[in-house]
Image (cartoon, rainbow, N blue to C red):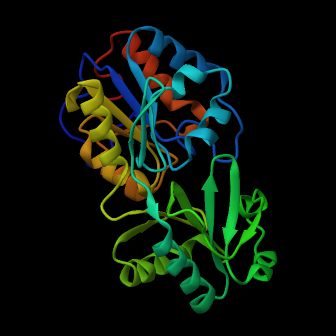
Amino acid sequence: MNHGSNAREGGMASGVCLVVSDIDDTLIPRGTHGLPRRTSAAIERFVASGRHFAPITGRSRDDALKMFGDCAAGCATGAFVNGQVVYVDGRLVRSELLPSARLQEVADYLDRCTPAANILLYRGASIHALTKKPWRLNDYPSQENGRRDGCIQAIEEPWVEKANIQCACDPQEVPALAARLSRQFEDFDFVQPGDVSEIDIAPKGWSKARGVQVLAQALGVELAQIVAVGDSDNDVALLEYVPNSYAVASGTATARRAAAYQLPPVHQEPVAQVLEAILAGETQPFCS
């Protein structure tokens, strides 16, 4: 296993007691339902050893719990919705919500100024498209749009936990739209979560790195006791913040540059390899 392109000196510190990992294309390949057996077993052993494993993902906690299935212990602690919603041992410790009135302005802008893009609102187990032009959704049946329970034209509640944007364009065109939205709505961050036609919406300045800060404070752990694993551009702040950071080889070039070290691609269950190495007491298992 190899250093990342900007690898720092040293390796994984001894005494690691918190491992945080993205889910899609890091823990499991995107589109997969459920954890592979080896990964699930490694997480359970790691948690049983008195340490914490925490998914740090753009997904809601409800969604993550479904993916973890019988490995519920691996989801008791985590930073969900890109670090906006933080749980420790099943207890909610932080929640950064999105103002509905401002999201409505974004939705109206997308209806008015883009050929086909819409906001999806995630509320518990339900998903609704927020648009006044619902007929446009037929032009781009993305996987997430296919999961929706319906369309609404306005948001009734004052705050929303999770929202993202589904785009009809190719993934390569998404950064331009994200940049355009960032200029128009400076109180939000718009981030493409990998090579997909989607944009995550987050409160300005809130990232997975902020989620890790909340986790570390709640658990009373030092930064040197944390290992972070990711694969995409929305993991960059996390990978730059945590010194013991790893990007999977199948991740984006930006994520690989941001990480200290590189892991095998996602289909080789790299997170399981990290957990197994820590449990075995190996302090520099991923350095060549």
* Residue at 67% from the left image edge and 77% from the top image edge: 131
Q: Which quarter of the image is occupied by the N terminus?
A: top left
Q: Nearer the viewer, residue 63 or 180?
A: 63
* Residue 76 on image: x %, y %: 50, 26
96 displayed left or right of 117: left
Visible residue check, residue 38 = yes
* Residue at 68% from the left image edge and 27% from the top image edge: 69
Q: In this rendering, is residue 69 above or below 42?
A: below
- Res 184 quadrant in image: bottom left
* Residue at 54% from the left image edge and 15% from the top image edge: 44
* Numbered marks: total: 0
- Res 274 quadrant in image: top left
Q: In this rendering, is residue 285 above or below 250?
A: above
Visible residue check, residue 12 = no
Q: Nearer the viewer, residue 5 or 141?
A: 141
47 displayed left or right of 216: right
- Res 50 quadrant in image: top left
Q: Nearer the viewer, residue 201 or 31?
A: 201
143 displayed left or right of 242: right
* Residue 111 on image: x %, y %: 63, 86
Q: Nearer the viewer, residue 210 or 12?
A: 210
Q: Which quarter of the image is occupied by the C terminus?
A: top left
* Residue 138 on image: x %, y %: 81, 76
Q: In this rendering, is residue 278 above or below 287?
A: above
63 displayed left or right of 17: right
* Residue 192 on image: x %, y %: 49, 64
